[in-house]
Image (tube, rainbow, N blue to C red):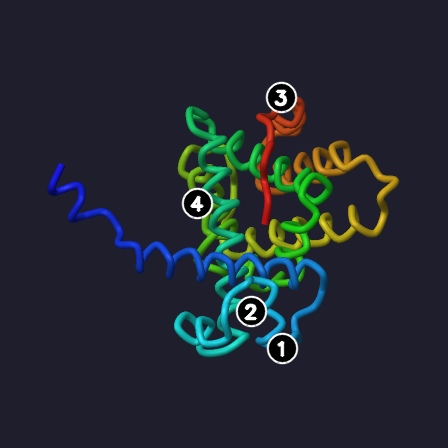
Amino acid sequence: MAQQTRNAPSRLERRKAHTRSALVRAAQTFIAAGKQNVPILELTQAADVGMGSFYNHFDSREQLYQAAVEDALERYGALLDELTVGLDDPAHVFAQSFRLTGRLHRRSPELSKVLLSNGLALASSDKGLAPRARRDIEDGVRAGRFSVGDPELAMVIVAGAALVLGQLLHDHPERDDAAATDRVTEDLLRTLGLPPDDAHEICLRPLPALDGVRP
């Protein structure tokens, strides 16, 4: 019990973590609203923290915004990992992650806009979705499910499709997001070398719920 007490975060550490989290969440809200040039004072007011607290965690607004994007990417990527536990086929893992991400744009529009507003970060970040997509593609190649000569170029196609699909679903709310996402996923699987019948069957499989996803 004494060891557990010594290892537990102190009240000051918990307060610092809470302040940083509040600033990150405030930044994510402004990013989702397309407001990336708000004054630091407005950010701190939205987070309900003092101006001095901001500089205890970040050197600039840009650094905070980068942290906010990375946080959203990593938390959503970790969720996708949880939802694909137990899937043995890397083609299924890739397809399920892409299909869930496509549905995210309507079900969690704030998180979607955080991701879409930082498209290059989505494609090249070492956190969040991009490294997981690269991993799934490379696993698919090793398993003989995908035929990809250059995984990095494959990622260009996948990332471009993910971003443009997300924007399309925001611009055209009348579109069925599930049907559009599954069609794009099926086309991507075929592009990666999966036989058409396999690609179609995988995209008909049931998906786990994305309940509670927030930016």
What amino acid is found at the position of numbered circle 3 in the picture?
Pro
What amino acid is found at the position of numbered circle 2 in the picture?
Thr
Residue at left 50%, top 71%? 50
Discs 4/2, front: 2
- The mark that comes first in sequence, 4 or 1, is 1
- The mark that comes first in sequence, 3 or 4, is 4
**Residue closest to the eye, 122 or 150:** 122
Whether residue 73 is visible: yes
- The mark that comes first in sequence, 3 or 2, is 2
**What x and y, as percent, mark residue 192?**
58, 41
What is the distance, in whole Å, between disc 4 and disc 2 at their CAs?
A: 37 Å
Residue at left 56%, top 51%? 154
Residue picked out by circle 4 = 135
SS under mark 1: loop
Discs 1/3, front: 1
Residue picked out by circle 2 = 44
Residue sitting farthest toward the left: 2
Which disc number belongs to residue 39? 1
What is the distance, in whole Å, between disc 1 and disc 3 at their CAs?
A: 45 Å
Q: Quadrant of residue 108?
A: top right
Residue picked out by circle 3 = 206
Discs 4/1, front: 1
What amino acid is found at the position of numbered circle 1 in the picture?
Pro
**Residue closest to the eye, 77 or 194:** 77
**What x and y, as percent, mark residue 198?**
61, 25
SS under mark 3: loop
**What x and y, as percent, mark residue 4?**
17, 41
Residue sitting farthest toward the right: 174
